Amino acid sequence: MPANIAILTKYFPKLTEKQRGQFEQLQELYSFWNNQINVISRQDIENLYEKHVLHSLGIAKVLDFKHGTEILDVGTGGGFPGIPLAILFPECQFHLVDSIGKKIKVVTEVAQAVGLKNLTAQHERAENVASDFDFIISRAVTRLKPFYGWVQHKVTRNQFNDLKNGILYLKGGDLTEELEEFGKKYKLYNLSDYFEEEFFETKKVVYVPF
């Protein structure tokens, strides 16, 4: 098994052969597309599986999405956390949006190449997305207070997961000031509780129930 896949199977041992194959393709695909359109820092391409793929899958340690869950990934960039989660949860629907069109091109090309049927991508600002969703996911796009303002009317009241519908936001560093400014109910999950790599020491998922 390639080393890059080993870091995923270490924490997600139940990956199917199809899922392992899809994850394996990401290295070559992102290396290719990053040379055309810079969506990941050059040094991070070497650590794609730890710093991007596994980091994205941290959300799955907080919540095992039930079949039929609809998820909006805001400011997805090159497809994180949406693409890794769409591979992990093939029975859920993912809609990835970004305000930069060339990044959505990368998302579309990568999703097609690995055969993701449960993912759509749109060049749009979050505020202008018409549908609503069970969960909103994102990775450090902006501070939590303005982010909440963008998406607060995008969450459906139809509850069927183990957590109430809401936001699952990947964040890093000291969030004390930002969470004080936010001023609403939240729960923090430390990714260091799930992953032992040093990279995850200060990484968190902020869950905001609606």
Image (cartoon, rainbow, N blue to C red):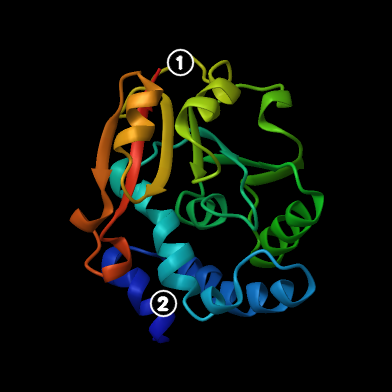
Q: In this view of the protein, which residue sits in the foreground, 59 or 145? A: 145
Quadrant position of residue 209: top left
Q: Of the numbered discs in the image, which one, if any, rests on residue 5?
A: 2
Q: Which residue is mark 1?
A: 158
- The quarter of the picture where the N terminus appears is bottom left
Is 3 rendered above or below residue 203?
A: below
Report the residue at 57% width, 24% height from top. 151
> Above or below — where is 146 with respect to 5?
above
Q: Residue at x 57, y 77 (%)?
A: 27
Residue under the image location 61 percent in, 55 percent down:
79
Q: Is residue 139 left or right of residue 13?
A: right
Local SS, label 1? loop
Residue 150: image location, x then y, percent:
60, 24
Tell me the amino acid under the disc marked 2.
Ile
- Residue 143 in percent (x, y) is at 49, 36
**How many neighbours does mark 1 have within 10 angstroms: few (below 14), some (14-19), or many (20 or more)?**
few
